[in-house]
Image (cartoon, rainbow, N blue to C red):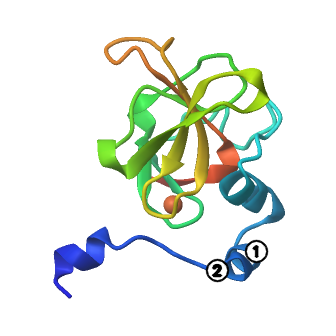
Amino acid sequence: MSDRAAKMRKTEKSDAEWRNELTPMQYAVLREKATERPFSGEYEFTTTPGTYVCAGCGQPLFASEAKFDSGCGWPSFTQPVVDDHVAEETDTSHGMTRTEVLCSSCSGHLGHVFPDGPGPTGLRYCINSAALKLLPK
Ligand code: FE
């Protein structure tokens, strides 16, 4: 396998492996699409410079420079660190139509993206702290 093919390989694990490796909260969010309570997460008010990676597989997802205080109760970002590191799906649960955001490598649920963010993207990636791990610079 070429280096590039190895890099593009998706992270695939069994349900038992995920349960073993993740905390109950990480598992609930990443694998069962749970949402942590607003203002309850570890990174809501974090301003430490660094890179937020997927708590499931380590793929870089958001840079601290893209983080902003939206007041919504979850860590919010204007854009991913690399566009194709996040995947989007239409989510019609709970009587709403929203755009779900997932890690493109392990398909872990991260949160949702809304079109009410600040410039230049106008987007607000509203992400569960439990889906993230901050690697400080
Ligand atoms: Fe991941």
Location of mark 2 (residue) = 14
Which x, y percent locates residue 135? 49, 56
In this view, the residue in front, 122 or 5, is 5
Disc 1 designates what residue?
A: 19
119 or 10, which lies in front?
Answer: 10
Q: Residue at x 34, y 18 (%)?
A: 121
Q: Quadrant of the N terminus?
A: bottom left
Asked if one can make out residue 137 in the rendered structure from this viewpoint, the answer is no
Residue 70: image quadrant is top right
Crowd around label 1: few <14 · some 14–19 · many ≥20 (10 Å): some
94 relative to 6 in the view: left or right: right
Q: Residue at x 73, y 33 (%)?
A: 93
Considering only vertical position in the picture, is 99 above or below 133?
A: above
Q: Secondary structure at mark 2?
A: loop
Q: Residue 131, image x and y in percent?
A: 63, 51
Q: Quadrant of residue 15?
A: bottom right
The amino acid type, in three-letter code, at marker 2 is: Ser
Q: Position of residue 91 (x, y in %)?
A: 62, 34
The kind of residue on which mark 1 rests is Arg
In this picture, residue 36 sits left or right of residue 92? right
Horizontal side, residue 49 vs residue 90: left or right: left
Q: Earlier in the sequence, mark 2 or mark 1?
A: 2
Residue 102 vs 127, above or below: the answer is below
Q: In this view of the protein, can residue 107 be seen by the observer?
A: yes
Mark 1 CB within 8 Å of ligand 1: no
